[in-house]
Image: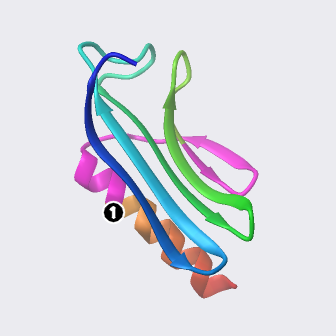
């Protein structure tokens, strides 16, 4: 991928779960997006991807929580990270 890496952070939360955040700045937006970032933020617990935020070519910005996929309104990298961590906190409270 041609672009500037901004973030590449794997983070172990405990023995059974981790977070991976990867963000690139691109020369032009991914088709379907209005921003110049390409990203993937994932929360994996017990080998299952529970929360994922990404932008897919032609589909735009997406939020995946368990098996549910919905459009995501991207406003900034900071808001993206805050929304991602809020989803993780919400799921951990429910379990």
Q: Position of residue 48 (x, y in %)?
A: 74, 60
Give the vertical position of 61 relative to 14 (above or below): above
What residue is shown at x 50% (from left), y 39% (from top)?
A: 54
Q: Quadrant of the C terminus?
A: bottom right
The reply, left or right, for residue 83 in relation to residue 14 is left
The segment highlighted magenta reads 63-81
Q: Position of residue 19 (x, y in %)?
A: 50, 63
Q: Number of numbered discs present?
A: 1
Q: Quadrant of the N terminus?
A: top left
The reply, left or right, for residue 48 in relation to residue 1 is right
What residue is shown at x 62% (from left), y 81% (from top)?
A: 15
Q: Is residue 61 visible?
A: no
Indicate whether residue 90 is drawn in magenta: no
Question: Around disc 1, counting alpha carbons within 10 Å, would you say few (fewer than 14), some (14 to 19), or many (20 or more)?
Answer: few
Q: Position of residue 80 (x, y in %)?
A: 35, 51
Residue nearest the viewer, comparing 62 with 52: 52
Q: Provide the residue designation for mark 1.
A: 82
Give the vertical position of 87 relative to 30 (above or below): below
Give the vertical position of 8 relative to 30 (above or below): below
Q: Secondary structure at mark 1?
A: helix
């Amino acid at each position: 991928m041609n672009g500037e890496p901004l973030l590449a952070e794997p983070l172990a939360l405990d023995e059974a779960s981790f977070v991976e955040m990867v963000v690139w700045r691109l020369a032009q937006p991914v088709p379907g997006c209005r921003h110049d970032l390409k990203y993937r933020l994932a929360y994996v617990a017990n080998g299952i991807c529970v929360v994922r935020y990404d932008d897919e070519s032609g589909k735009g910005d997406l939020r995946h929580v368990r098996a549910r996929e919905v459009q995501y309104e991207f406003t900034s990298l900071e808001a993206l990270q805050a929304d991602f961590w809020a989803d993780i906190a919400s799921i951990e409270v429910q379990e």
